[in-house]
Image (spheres, helix red, strand yellow):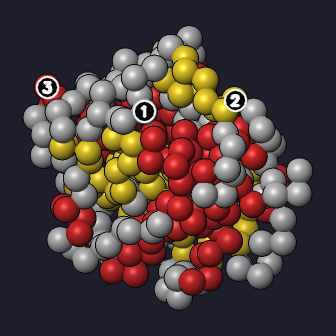
């Protein structure tokens, strides 16, 4: 099997390429990234040992993948992802993310490649206590431009469900260590602030709000499951390691950093109500995601243990 990974140098992509050898069906992996994030470290010591080929490409160019052939599965990770900073950059993010997806869709249609597409649990926005993939569209209330774009992407693929084989996974907020790790998401930003003895900014009234989180280890399990089981049924699935409150996350951090400094701040987002995301739908197909976020927190803080 030959696969293509877009956005390969990012937080999730770099973890995948470090572990791709664990998926025995994969014989060749093509990686593309525009490297605007300058995360060259994601490529260090990986290409030869895991039979990887890297190409610097910008998916905003609809012809950027034309010379790549015979791909069985595409894992599409390339996008602008910082939800909080997407305010004020709506046009740029809409253009970039939707153009990138269109390029990938064209490629999959032309090459009859199957697609793993990532969305976000942020599409649920302001919600009731428990949410799942079957909630009515009127209850999908994404609050950030990033989440709104993800919902548009989902709808775009649903319209093509008779022409392309794919799955969309609504990932929880990513946590964990990889060569392309980023620190703009909640758990990772809390960890680096704690490790550096800096203030941890917490939104007012958010301490006991539940939100979904996903370990990079479980993210890899999603890809491995789809590829090994040939699991592509043109549907949407939630993917998370667990639902936790901010207080619970901070208490996990305190296991490895006793003293932390919390600063309460106003939120730029509106979707700060508490909700649980249900993942029983994907579990019915045999995929169990239950990585311990505590280990991801420990590993992240340990990156800075000598400071």
Taking depth in this image into account, of 34 and 60 the one nearest to the observer is 34
Q: Nearer the viewer, mark 2 or mark 3?
A: 2
The residue positioned farthest toward the front in the image shown = 258
Q: Is residue 249 above or below residue 83?
A: below
Q: Residue at 36% x, 26% y: name it.
A: 272
Taking depth in this image into account, of 78 and 124 the one nearest to the observer is 124
Q: Is residue 293 left or right of residue 165?
A: right
The residue where tag 1 is placed is 207
The residue positioned farthest toward the right in the image shown = 307
Q: Is label 1 in a helix, a strand or a loop?
A: loop
In the rendered image, residue 192, in percent from the top left (x then y), is placed at 71, 43
> Which of disc 1 and disc 2 is earlier in sequence?
2
Q: Nearer the viewer, mark 1 or mark 3?
A: 1
Q: Is label 2 in a helix, a strand or a loop?
A: strand
Q: How many marks?
A: 3
> Which of disc 3 and disc 2 is earlier in sequence?
3
The residue where tag 3 is placed is 138
Q: Is label 3 in a helix, a strand or a loop?
A: helix
Q: Is residue 191 left or right of residue 234?
A: right
Q: Quadrant of residue 246?
A: top left
Q: Is residue 264 above or below residue 30?
A: above
Q: Residue at 26% x, 45% y: name it.
A: 276
The residue where tag 2 is placed is 199
């Amino acid at each position: 099997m030959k696969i293509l990974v877009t956005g390969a140098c990012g937080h999730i992509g770099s973890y995948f390429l470090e572990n791709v050898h664990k998926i025995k069906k994969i014989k060749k992996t093509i990686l593309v990234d525009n490297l605007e994030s300058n995360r060259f470290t994601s490529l260090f010591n990986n290409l030869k040992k895991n039979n990887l080929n890297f190409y610097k490409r910008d998916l905003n160019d609809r012809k950027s993948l034309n010379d790549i052939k015979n791909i069985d599965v595409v894992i599409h990770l390339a996008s602008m992802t910082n939800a909080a900073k997407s305010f004020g950059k709506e046009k740029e993010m809409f253009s970039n993310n939707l153009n990138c997806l269109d390029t990938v869709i064209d490629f999959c249609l032309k090459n009859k490649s199957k697609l793993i597409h990532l969305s976000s649990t942020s599409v649920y926005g302001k919600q009731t206590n428990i949410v799942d993939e079957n909630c009515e569209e009127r209850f999908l209330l994404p609050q950030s431009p990033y989440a709104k774009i993800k919902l548009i992407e989902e709808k775009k693929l649903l319209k093509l469900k008779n022409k392309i084989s794919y799955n969309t996974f609504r990932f929880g907020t990513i946590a964990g260590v990889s060569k392309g790790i980023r620190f703009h998401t909640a758990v990772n930003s809390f960890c680096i602030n704690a490790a550096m003895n800096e203030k941890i900014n917490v939104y007012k009234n958010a301490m006991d709000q539940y939100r979904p989180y996903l370990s990079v280890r479980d993210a890899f399990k999603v890809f491995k499951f789809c590829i090994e089981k040939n699991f592509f049924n043109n549907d949407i699935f939630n993917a998370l390691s667990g639902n936790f409150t901010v207080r619970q996350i901070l208490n996990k951090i305190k296991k490895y950093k006793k003293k932390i400094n919390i600063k309460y701040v106003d939120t730029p987002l509106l979707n700060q109500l508490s909700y649980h995301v249900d993942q029983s739908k994907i579990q019915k197909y045999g995929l169990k995601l239950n990585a311990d976020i505590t280990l991801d927190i420990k590993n992240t803080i340990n990156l800075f243990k000598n400071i």
